[in-house]
Image: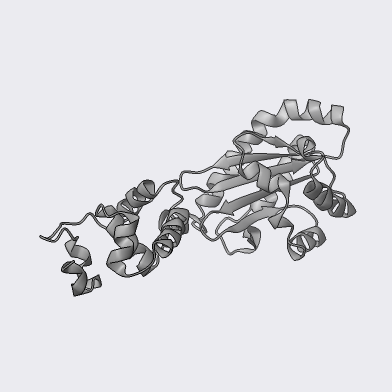
């Protein structure tokens, strides 16, 4: 996954860093960070108030690929207290490096899920004892969850990502395969019609499901139709959708 620093982009009213600083000041936290998971480009985008040197090292060493504070929270619907990660080897590796920049193991990551498969992860840290952390977390968790939702919504409204998430692009082959599936053809039927392997059809369907943030092929077809990427088709006497006839070799029509 690549990493995109939203605070460096020319977005109107881009006050991401100031927002994080104000959260830390209000709730007596050391650091705060927002990381969004782009399900289409498989990239991490975000903004943090960690030291610049740590940000550079984090990306250089590829910690975004193995940081359990991100990966675990991205699979969760509930806030993830970093204490539960203490026995994770990847957590130890990342935190050992982070400690050089005064970032320690008391932390919390709050996931926020959007309607297009987008995920926002809001993290905060504080260097304190377990007891102090438990008391602080109990006091401010509700406010942090509200802040997490606000941040994710704010990022999505900048249009940096929302256009891509609401208007995903499919390749011409992916659209072609999805069009046949929408016409009621099975995966093997599509392979026969297009003279490609069943495996190739599956690869394209899997890619389409990922791009459309769909769990099933049927769901992907519905979203593709809703976004105008493919169309409901009329059928000719051979049972083929007329909208796709120009893409089919004529010998298939005679089978």
Residue 205: name its quadrant. bottom left
* Depth check, front residue: 250 or 165: 250
Image position, residue 155 (x, y; %): 56, 51
- Name which residue lies at 80% across and 52% down: 94
Which of the colour schemes (rainbow, by chain, secondary structure, one colour) is used?
one colour
Image position, residue 219 (x, y; %): 37, 46
**Image-based side of 212 in relation to 19, left or right:** left
**Image-based side of 170 in relation to 128, left or right:** left
Image position, residue 106 (x, y; %): 81, 38
Residue 230 in sight: no
For the C terminus, the image quarter is bottom left
Residue 169: name its quadrant. bottom left
Decide: is 248 above or below 215: below
Residue 32 in sight: yes
Image position, residue 54 (x, y; %): 80, 58
Numbered label tally = 0
* Depth check, front residue: 44 or 31: 44
**Image-based side of 126 in relation to 141, left or right:** right
In the orientation shown, which residue stands out farthest toward the left? 237
* Depth check, front residue: 180 or 191: 191
- Name which residue lies at 79% across and 62% down: 57
* Depth check, front residue: 75 or 204: 204
Decide: is 216 above or below 141: below
- Name which residue lies at 40% across and 67% down: 171
For the N terminus, the image quarter is bottom right
Decide: is 232 above or below 245: above
Decide: is 208 above or below 216: below
**Image-based side of 184 in relation to 111, left or right:** left
């Amino acid at each position: 996954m690549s990493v995109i620093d939203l605070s460096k982009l020319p977005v109107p009213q881009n006050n991401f860093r100031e927002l994080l600083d104000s959260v830390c000041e209000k709730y007596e936290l050391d650091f705060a960070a927002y990381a969004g998971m782009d399900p289409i480009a498989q990239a991490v985008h975000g903004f943090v108030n960690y030291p610049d040197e740590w940000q550079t090292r984090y990306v250089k060493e590829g910690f975004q690929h193995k940081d359990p504070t991100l990966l675990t929270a991205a699979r969760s619907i509930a806030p993830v207290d970093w204490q539960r990660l203490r026995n994770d080897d990847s957590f130890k590796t990342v935190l050992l490096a982070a400690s050089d920049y005064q970032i320690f193991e008391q932390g919390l990551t709050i996931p926020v899920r959007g309607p297009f498969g987008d995920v926002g992860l809001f993290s905060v840290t504080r260097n304190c004892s377990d007891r102090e952390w438990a008391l602080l977390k109990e006091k401010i968790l509700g406010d942090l969850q509200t802040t997490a939702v606000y941040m994710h919504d704010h990022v999505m409204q900048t249009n940096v990502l929302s256009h891509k998430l609401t208007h995903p692009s499919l390749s011409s082959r992916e659209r072609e395969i999805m069009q046949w599936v929408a016409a009621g053809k099975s995966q093997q039927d599509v392979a026969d019609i297009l003279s490609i392997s069943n495996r190739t059809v599956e690869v394209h369907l899997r890619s389409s499901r990922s791009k459309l943030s769909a769990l099933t092929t049927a769901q992907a077809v519905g979203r593709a139709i809703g976004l105008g990427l493919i169309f409901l088709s009329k059928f000719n006497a051979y049972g083929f959708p007329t909208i796709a006839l120009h893409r089919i070799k004529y010998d298939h029509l005679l089978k």
